[in-house]
Image (spheres, rainbow, N blue to C red):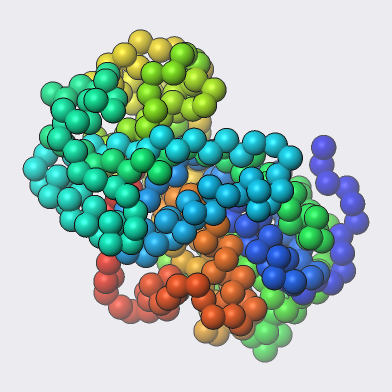
Amino acid sequence: MKNKKELVKQADIVIIGGGISGCSIAYNLAAEGQQNIVVIEKEYITSGATGRCGAGIRQQWGTKMNCMLAKKSVDFFEKAQEILEYDGDVEFKQEGYLVIASDEEEAKTFAKNVKLQNSLDIPSRVLTKEEAKEIVPHLNTDVVHSATFCPTDGHLNPFTMTDAYYKAAKRLGVEFYTYTTVESIVMEDDIIQAVQTDRGTIKTSIVVNAAGGWAKDIGRMVDVDIPVYSENHEILVTEPVETMQGPMVISFSQNIYCQQTPHGAFIMGRGDKDMPKGYDVSSSWKFLDEMSKTVTRLLPPIGELRVIRQWGGLYNMSPDHQPIISGTKHRKGFYIACGFSGHGFMLAPMTGVLLSELILGKTPSMPMEALSLDRFDGKEIIEMETSVV
């Protein structure tokens, strides 16, 4: 049912985007005592990348910042049901991620990554391909060199988790307006004055851009060039079967992630280097053909399952494949949470914490220089995250 309630005329903070990032930011602000918060979503809650994601949660990254964000987010997810007082089940299944190394070069990189992860209290470890097969018996070790494994990684329902944030934020007084499109952001002398929507104007001095795949467009409304772009990544889901695979199996070089959900279906996805930039979220025969071949080669029994449906979703890519969680130098009151490069869902708890601290002038829970928009100001990329499918 479309949102018909009358739009408020004024808000202290307007958040653009009703995915998990926007809902997490709203909740964290409200939990710190901030009032008069509005979230604007052009369709329904989770209609964008959140509702189209692969639902994986992992801490096995190659950069320190992504590892830290993921570790602290997992710490929250483990207690989210109680903290948010959710009336349902967020369905957090921690049965690990098995990261496949296809050759010796990849194995060396992953071993280095594990050292970094262990230094940050992430319990990952290096495995031989024989040890990997003990964890996933149907793994075809002929196409595996070795692997890494973290038992506290897993799967989380994006709809119930976002709903938990949404309901908790509403209880704290946050107003949500769905099926409401932002048309412009009004400024005078480089100071934000209001947000203009297709349903009216909301006066405000603070705007948060949590618009996911459309974040660059929102930035243009205040003449801020955010160095991100969006591209389609596709996913399919199979018929449900009895439990046969606990962890997510992921291979960056073979371009696949594949996990069995708590309901028995397998969900799997991949990127396409030839995919044009843009907002297309359709799904193709090419994807189905290539995914079928890859999963049949790596996890042969899964190739026998029937496909129920397939779809696309937007990755909002940053130059270094790490998020932008930041204010802006020349637009006081304009804040950004975007560029998650396909992993905004699993980093949402810390996105909400850090951005709320930034807005409220509190000391950040972790150093944020590596997340700042300023890191791209004519500078070379210091650290590139390569662990992306």
Can I make out residue 15 in this image? no
Observer-nearest of 48 and 78: 78
Q: Which residue, as the protein is rendered here, is positioned at the far left?
A: 104
Residue drawn at (45%, 38%) of the image: 94
Residue 256 spot, x, y in % from top left: 32, 34
Residue drawn at (62%, 57%) of the image: 24
Can I make out residue 21 in this image? yes
Image position of 306 with respect to 316: above or below? above
Residue 45 spot, x, y in % from top left: 69, 45
Image quarter of residue 169 = bottom right
Does residue 187 appear to the left or right of 300 in the view shown?
right
- Quadrant of the image containing the C terminus: top left
Image position of 299 with respect to 332: above or below? above
Image position of 32 with respect to 332: above or below? above
Residue drawn at (31%, 14%) of the image: 301
Image quarter of residue 331 = bottom right
Does residue 274 appear to the left or right of 157 in the view shown?
left
Residue 307 spot, x, y in % from top left: 46, 16
Residue drawn at (44%, 18%) of the image: 243
Image position of 147 with respect to 110: above or below? above
